[in-house]
Amino acid sequence: MKNSILILCFIILSGFAIAQTDIADARTFSVGSSVTVSGIVTNGPELSTIRYFQDASAGIAVYSYDVTYFAPGDSITVTGVLDDYNNLLEIASVTFHTVHSSNNPMPVPAVITPAQMSEDYESELVQLENVVFDNAGSTFQANTSYTFSFNGESSTVYIRSGHPLVGAVIPGNPVTLIGICSQFYANYQLLLRGPDDIINGSAINIISPIAVSNISTSSFDLQWLTDSAATTEVFYGKTQALEMGLLQNPGSGTSHAISFTGLDPATIYYVLSFSVLNDDTAFSNVNAFCTQSLSSGEMKAYFTRSVDNSVSTGTDAIFLDDLVDDTLINYINRATESIDLTIYDFNPANISDIAGALNNAHANGVEVRAIFDTSWTTVNLGQLLSPGINSLPAPDLAEYGIMHNKFVVFDADATDPDKAIVWTGSTNFEDVNINTFANNVIIVHDQSLARAYRAEFNEMWGGDSIVPNLAQSKFGPFKKDNTPHEFIIGGNRVECYFSPSDGTNSKIGRTISSADDELFVETMLITRTDLGDSILSRVSNGVQTKVIIDDPSSSNSSVVNGLESALGSNFKIYGEDGMLHNKLMIVDPAGSDPLVLTGSHNWSSSAENRNDENTLIIHNAEMANIYLQEFMARFQNALPVPENPFIDWSNKLYPNPSQGQFIIDMNDGSGQIIEIVIFDVSGKEVYRNHTINPLDGKVLIEDFSAKAGVYFVKLMADQYSETRRLSIIH
């Protein structure tokens, strides 16, 4: 009798579980509701674990490792619980799934415009016609968003790691896109499934990035490839109006080269490259290129921690012990015409008076402009500057990250080209960054680079006037790739990239892949699996590799596990006071192309897609060795990745994302004193608390008040520590 009752209950409950509804109706249910819906699958593994499917009424996503066998064209039924993942409605906690049939026709995509990407079409196949990509001529990269537009409307395509479009050239002609309308926080984005989702009806297409070579003070050459024989033509000018007119090479072909001569030194030229075949024309984007300057090209690097001069090959690296602030003030005092300053974290406490130096420069007739971030500090730089100095706080928008730059441009247009200077690196202008953290500063005396950095400044500022133009000001994902990337400085090649417009992570990956003999990485964190995979690829090819990160738990766990397995004792964590805040890499310091990569760009997706960042890649043996001296000092003091018997993160940290209150579950109830420290993405400490691990092992944090964003929660007890990422949403 008892067994009969149990069987009857199971039948009744099963009947409720498979009660069918259409997808449009299911989308009206509250999060946490159980639903059973059917439809046709529209994507495969190119979008990872998630599967989208739709019926005649609407579309929805299902996220479960149990359904990764679903293939495009499968007719399916799924039972699970509605969940909200970063504003995308999806079915999770799947309890039932089946495939009824396969190879069914795809649903007909809804034809919409970019402005119609919305909840009305979430998780459905859509088609957008005659759209143009902003980054035409460059290549699609992993975990990156790309803006496209039509008739004044715009939206984005998102390409994830492992996607079949990674490495493909972004078309320059108007194209039709077919993909899935998805949502990530407030942004609706189009998920392409492969090359067939880009329909290009043109008979001629540019199939390579526009490459520059032979840069001199008065000339440079450009090259590109097309898929059919066509002409070689450009419009160009000193402004994006391309006022200098048309330049052509005779004949036609698929390999195109054109020379620009009679140019001015240290001058940015804007070029629209195109090739014509009968009635069709293939266009690139308007690209920026810069001639070589007449500057000395002198470079200086300074470090906030000790260096190891025993590996010096002639020029010793310099440890500036608590003197970076004074050094910056000396450069401010030397400026005669202009100072354009950007800074993420500024705090005058316990450092020399940088704001006062800027005020003095202004009083002496120097034009001073300042851009600063207000996300993580209560100190408003603008309020410390003289009333006559114009300043601009970075925007506070949901789709924007942070203004994470720390660069200063001095006298970019000085008559004497040696007065034009760029100051950049990883060092914020505040106490722990200057006096405790491991950071670097690099100073480049070059007018061409100074003008490129000033062009980036002007895009955020909204123009080149002394007063910011808020109507034209563009930050983060709203910026364009409109600065030069290739320079000849002091006879050496230098690359310069700004985020998020320039696809910087792909340049980091390419730089890693260029290592032939030796690779040294010293970076705060690596959350990007593609960059971790690039390092592992070099290791498997016999490249001698050493890596230091700040804390393994701040990075992607699969990256940490892969590096630890492949490198053993050559993979270490920072072992000194404060934080490893550098973001640098040295490649082949004794090889044929020695280089160093440095800047503000963390090896993360936020830096790639949302933040304002800058990166330099300097192909210079002397600078590579100088940075190697710093690296070796860090490596000697670094520690092996520790075993951690202290904290069991099986329940981890929840809820995550959080609105400011969350629980940390150590799951051991040891009663020992622990210290909880929370850092923002720049490494700045924003919260600290001492507490006792309670008997149930659960610590409630209810007084963490912070803006929306990503943080790192670090727990410490005795010699052990553990860090986990935390997302704050409001």
Image (tube, helix red, strand yellow):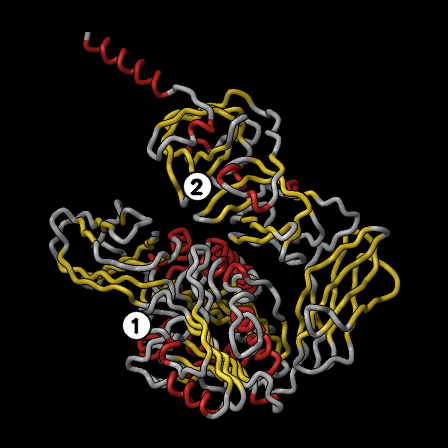
| Residue drawn at point x = 37 percent, y = 52 percent | 557
Assess disc 1: are there few (<14), some (14-19) or many (≥20) residues with their C-alpha within 10 Å of its C-alpha: some
Can you give x and y, in whole percent of width and height, for residue 264 in the image?
A: 71, 82
Q: Can residue 515 be seen in this view?
A: no
Residue 174 horizontal side relative to residue 315, left or right = right
Which amino acid, mark 2? Leu
Residue 720, image quadrant? bottom left
Q: Nearer the viewer, residue 322 or 243?
A: 243
**Who's the residue at 79% across and 68% down the image?**
258
- In the image, is residue 263 above or below residue 670? below
Identity of the amino acid at label 1? Answer: Glu
Is 700 situated above or below 396?
above
Q: In this view, does 690 lie to the left or right of 29?
A: left
Indicate the secondary structure of the residue bearing disc 2: strand
Residue for badge 1? 576
For disc 2, the marked residue is 88
What secondary structure is found at the residue carrying circle 1? loop
Counting from the top left corner in percent of width and height, residue 561 is at 38, 53
